[in-house]
Image (cartoon, rainbow, N blue to C red):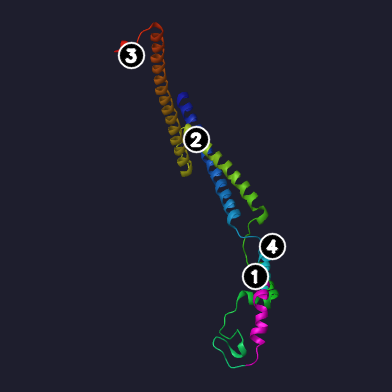
């Protein structure tokens, strides 16, 4: 009975250890998912309202300035400042560039109604519900930090799975881990093969050099003894 009790105890301990490892793995994977979501949000989320509004305002100011520089004077002098005359092709009454069916450009709106546009856009931003990302000046640093944190969690998960497999608990690694390990193994094989090939080439070269050295030594020795090495070799 004592043996059976011991077997039961070991089985219960194994089940408890397996359950603890499985729970730990589930917790790590939950942390991994949360960190990935956080990283994705920091990478892709729109700018905060405090940056969106100034960008729009600057754009409106630039469009207004461009319109003033390029077209405002012509609107006064060449269009509405012209003397009354018959309707001309391509123009409306009195040479006006606008009519009821004419579309209005952003530059024209910015020039004539820039302040109203900026105020209405600020109201729109404040009324639009969304979760902004980090400020642009801090975004790169935040992404870098979150990437490091995610990599640490992924490494922790990979090590835990290796430990579980070593204890006979079969758990499959993530697809990217399997691919990376396969690529690493292939690189090691290629590197080892390259070393072997280099050594083989060096051996061939060394053998050739040794053979040439023997022939050279024999030639010198024969010359010193007054023997024609070439004729004796025949």
- Label 1: few (<14), some or many (≥20) within 10 Å? few
Residue with the mark numbered 2: 162
Cα separation, mark 4 vs mark 1, equals 13 Å
* Percent coordinates x, y for residue 50 in the rendering: 69, 62
Dot 2 or dot 4: first in sequence order is: 4
Residue 141 visible to the viewer: yes
Q: Which residue occupies the foreground of this view, 148 or 97?
A: 97
The mark lying in front, picked from 3 and 2, is: 3
Determine the secondary structure under disc 3: helix
Q: Which residue occupies the foreground of this view, 63 or 178?
A: 63
Q: Which residue occupies the foreground of this view, 227 or 187?
A: 227
Determine the secondary structure under disc 4: helix
Q: How many marks?
A: 4
Residue lying at the far front in this picture: please name it.
Answer: 226
Q: Magenta stretch containing residue 79, yes or no?
A: yes
Determine the secondary structure under disc 2: helix
Cα separation, mark 3 vs mark 2, equals 68 Å
The mark lying in front, picked from 2 and 4, is: 4
Residue with the mark numbered 4: 50
Cα separation, mark 1 vs mark 2, equals 52 Å
Residue 124's tag is: 1
The mark lying in front, picked from 4 and 1, is: 4
* Percent coordinates x, y for residue 181 in the rendering: 47, 38
- Label 2: few (<14), some or many (≥20) within 10 Å? some
The region drawn magenta spans 65-84
The mark lying in front, picked from 3 and 4, is: 3
């Amino acid at each position: 009975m004592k043996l059976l009790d011991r077997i039961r105890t070991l089985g219960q301990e194994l089940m408890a250890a397996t359950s603890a490892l499985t729970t730990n793995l589930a917790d790590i994977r939950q942390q991994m998912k949360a960190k990935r979501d956080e990283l994705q949000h920091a990478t892709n989320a729109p700018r905060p309202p405090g940056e969106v509004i100034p960008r729009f305002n600057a754009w409106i100011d630039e469009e207004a300035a461009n319109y003033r520089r390029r077209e405002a004077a012509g609107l006064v002098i060449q269009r509405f400042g012209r003397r009354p005359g018959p309707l001309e092709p391509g123009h409306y009454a009195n040479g006006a560039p606008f009519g009821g069916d004419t579309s209005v450009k952003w530059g024209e709106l910015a020039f004539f109604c820039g302040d109203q546009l900026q105020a209405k856009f600020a109201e729109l931003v404040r009324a639009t519900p969304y979760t902004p990302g980090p400020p642009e000046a801090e975004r790169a640093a935040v992404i870098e930090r979150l990437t490091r944190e995610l990599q640490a969690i992924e490494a922790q998960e990979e090590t835990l799975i290796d430990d579980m497999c070593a204890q006979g608990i079969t758990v499959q690694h993530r697809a990217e881990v399997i691919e990376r390990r396969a690529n690493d193994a292939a690189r090691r094989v290629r590197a080892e093969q390259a070393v072997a090939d280099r050594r083989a080439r060096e051996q061939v070269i060394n053998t050739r050099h040794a053979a040439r050295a023997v022939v050279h030594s024999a030639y010198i020795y024969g010359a010193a003894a007054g023997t024609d090495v070439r004729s004796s070799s025949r």
